[in-house]
Image: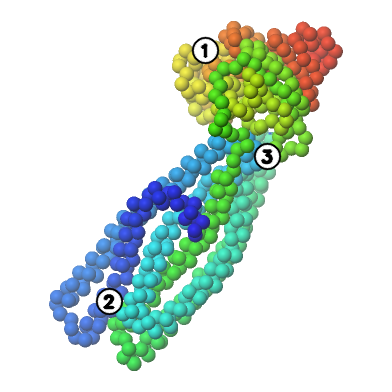
Amino acid sequence: MSNILSKISWFIKEEWKTYVFMLFLLLSIAFIALTPAWVLGYSIDTIVSGGLTKTTLTLLVIALVLLPLGRYLLSFMYNYLSNKTAQKLSYKLRQKYLSHLFDMDSKFYEQYEKGDLISRVTADLDAITQAATSLLEGIIFNVGIILFAIGVMSLTISWQLTLISVAIMPVGLTILNIIRYNKRKYIKRHREIYADMTEKVLESVEGQRAIRAYVQEENDLKKQYEAIDNDIESWRYIVKYENWFNPLFEVIYGISYILAFGFGIYFIINQQITLGNLITFISYVGLLFGPIISISTIFTQINNATISIDRYEEIMKETPEVHDEVFSKPIVKFNKLEFKNVTFKYPFDKVPVIKNISFEINKGETIGIVGPTGAGKSTLIRQLLREFNVTDGQVFIDDISIEEYKIEDIRNLVGYVPQAHMLFKRSVDENIMIGNPLANHEALDKAVKIADFEKDLLFLQNGMQTQVGEAGSTLSGGQKQRLSIARALIKDPEILILDDSLSAVDAKTEDTIIEHLKAFRKGKTNIIVAHRFSAVRDADQIYVLQAGKITQRGTHEMLIKTDGWYKNQYIEQMTMR
Ligand code: ADP
């Protein structure tokens, strides 16, 4: 309980006024809830003693009518506020979580699955909000009612009778709560299985095209069913514990009633209490049932929420390895880029992908990087995006390590066109403007022109306003590539990286884009990773990467004259034309 309270104390501080008002409402509701039983007992004693007058009768009737009405109004206000604060809490927790996810680096995303991250922000956050909301209501309202009822029972009726009939309840509850506590491990397991199920659903939805293309619906559905079965199976253990609880508590409660009734009659015979007292007493015993069950349920919710809090906190405690320092330097332009003995190993791999790489790029140059698939070309140039820190060596920009600059500034310096395009379910122009939301029409037109995307617009139903389907499903492979190139170009970046971004365009379009880059990007730097040598033919320097090492470097003219991978591939590409 203190765990949850300490985790949301910032929210309680922010909303303390609402909480104080809700507290007042709850205490008023608790008070009203207990009054009718007292009024009933008082009425019976008045009738039995023959003291009932017209005025007392009218007052009693008015009280019995007004009390539920008052309770309804106060409950309405309380529920409204309670739901509102719960929504607010959930909103703020989600906001914190999502902004934290945006701060995370690539290592984090390699560590956690998407489905897991989603389930933490949905199921786990719901459990936390639910418990936090119930906490106030449960503890204040129910404990208030219990204490109030026991106070009235023991102080105004008989403390002996109260002790006899109520003492069994906390003993029974404690035993049952111990049983419930043991349920924790099953809940933890259930949360993990739920995350796994979310991941599977996500994968199937994302991969539905491939699944259909390979007629794998049945296989996929089988996997989904297995995940759902596991989910239900993990629930079964939890429900088993629950099933133990309620009937057992009813038994305890029944005993309490019998004790109250039996000893109550004995107390009346001994003239220690009146008949009205016993009726009030029995009603109060009845009133205790709801709150005691609620408190116990709230303990269960808190129990569940502690697991969720741990899962939420696990993510919130993660810190990105790639992060800014207070002394991080700003940068908007550069003159020289240098890779010096750079070695890089992916966080969960054993061997490095690129090894001891050294080269320089001067501002305004165009660099080509070629080599077999899997050689590490993409890994090499992605070091400029600051996704990971290098394992060994350094990348320098103007003789200062890249790690000393502000991450955002470095990313602003670079326009990166990845191999796999990420398009959003928005219009074409909105998709391009992601590269630079502040760009004007001229910049948009220029980017579209350089990327040779102009011709595609004629074929799109609504031109720039055409809605792109999820993951770009309404566009062809080549169109997606050109749109992605336009997105990178609209920022007019100091360094443009085309990471095998011309693979889906035909040779003529490739020529046009390369010519456009030469014409429109004078003084700016381009890094082109390509399979077709035509894309890098005019580069100032070409690097051949094989198995993570630079094996050849030079201009196209030099390389075709030197024996090696470049010359062999060139001959092969020429003969295939
Ligand atoms: P290229 O661009 O030359 O085709 P990549 O840089 O994409 O090569 O990949 C080089 C090697 O690194 C490959 O063996 C690939 O499997 C591995 N690799 C790529 N991305 C990751 C990653 N995120 N985690 C682990 N290994 C990776």
Residue that protrudes farthest toward the front in the picture: 327
Picture quadrant of residue 33:
bottom left
Helix, strand or loop at mark 3: loop
Picture quadrant of residue 280:
bottom left
Dot placed on the residue nearer the N-terminal end, 3 or 2: 2
Does residue 265 appear left or right of residue 421 in this picture? left
Q: Is 72 or 182 nearer to us in this picture?
A: 182
Residue 239 % position (x, y): 56, 63
Q: CA distance from mark 3 to mark 2?
A: 69 Å
Helix, strand or loop at mark 2: helix
Q: Is 232 or 5 nearer to us in this picture?
A: 5
Q: Is 17 or 455 nearer to us in this picture?
A: 17
Query: Where is 563 relative to 383, above or below?
Result: above
Residue 243 seen from this side = no
Residue 16 seen from this side = yes
Residue 436 % position (x, y): 50, 22
Residue under the point 65% across and 20% down: 399
Dot placed on the residue nearer the N-terminal end, 2 or 1: 2
Dot placed on the residue nearer the N-terminal end, 1 or 3: 3
Which residue bears the numbered disc 3? 216
